[in-house]
Amino acid sequence: MAYIGQNLDRFSNVEKLDAITPATATGAGPYNLTKGGVAFTPSSADTMVISINGVVQYGNFTVSSSTVTFSAALADADVCDFIYHMGTGLLSTPVDNSVSTAKIVDSNITTAKIANDAVTNAKILNESITINGSAVALGGSVTVGETKPTISSSSFTIAPSVSSTITIAGSNFISVPIVEAISSTGVITRASAVTFTSSSSINATFTLANGSYFLRVENNDGNAVRTSSAILSVSSAPSWTTSAGSLGSFSAGSTISGLNVVATSDSNVTITEVTSPLTLTGNSDTPATTMNLTLSGSAGTTATYTISGTAPSPTSDTNYSFTLRATDVESQTADRTFSITISVGANNSGQFN
């Protein structure tokens, strides 16, 4: 049949279907639609071009699945000239401004269809982007109202390899946060237990090896804080090498030297007298006298301090009891009580004539 215009093969997805065979018995239909003998389902009646007896049909048939039904009955004498399925568009590139919003199927433009760096500020509605509920003006900035926790505690010291609980002071804690100890080498140990007391106080339990650790607290909203320095020290408390009790007996007025006391720790230790620095005083069982001996030495992981000086000259044998304290860098302490006996012999009985 003659027609005016471009050949049908210039249209996209144009498919020629098998002609149907009109029959009086079938009447208006339905008639099966096939292509090469295989059932064919058109997208809609609007995409179908059917010619019967040299007349192109329009608006007088419907399609359902792979069948077509006419509004008027066909007869054996009728002839189907051709059936074309026209597809959904043209093969040629659409002219500018010819594709309207109505012609684009919803959700049909995917991420893969958008070129990298193709979406500019000019294509985004101003203040259409929000961060934490605050609208962002394009080309401007926004201050995001984050509420980060803080840690105000300055230092902690716990023993190694023992479950220990510390109380962390700060602000903006949210129940129940994650608490971590971070070693100087970056090894992270999460607290085995965390107790939320208030927004300004939490308890965390750790079992850690010797060392210094940063502390990190992360709220359940993702906001977190880490201390700027290693405020958690894991260290053993000092211990005494010198046994408690008597350090010896000395004659009144004699010279005392080389009388050593020793304490150790995993950090430097200093030794002081609990009662009065550098002075050993008599206990309540003796006259309120002072031995006036000197305690001297240098700090170290093994600290050796020497008691020296001239023994006092009491009127009778006197036992002087005193307490020394070993203190390490982490301010851990260990006290030990010692005694020195001063003997008054015949050589000191000058009162007898």
Image: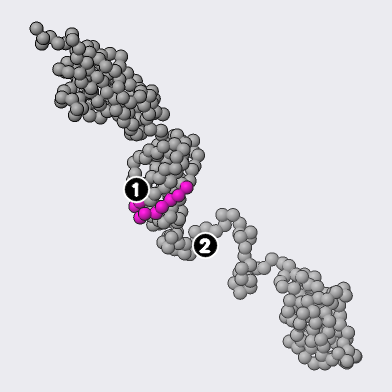
Secondary structure beneath disc 1?
A: strand
Task: Locate residue 18: give its quadrant.
Answer: bottom right
The reply to whether callout 2 and callout 1 are in contact (CB within 8 Å) is no
Note whether 104 is above or below 120 in the view shown. below
| Residue located at (27% from left, 18% from top) | 307
Q: Which residues are magenta?
A: 192-201
Residue 50 lies, in percent from the top left, at 80, 82
Direction from residue 329 to residue 88 in the image, left or right: right
N-terminal of the two: label 2 or label 1?
Answer: 2
Judge whether residue 98 is colored magenta: no
Q: Which residue is mark 1?
A: 169
Q: Is residue 66 visible?
A: yes
| Residue located at (61% from left, 74% from top) | 102
Direction from residue 349 to residue 221 in the image, left or right: right
Mark 1: amino acid: Ala
Q: Is residue 226 visible?
A: no
Q: Tell me, for residue 123, which label it has, or none.
A: 2
Residue 140 lies, in percent from the top left, at 41, 56
| Residue located at (35% from left, 24% from top) | 243
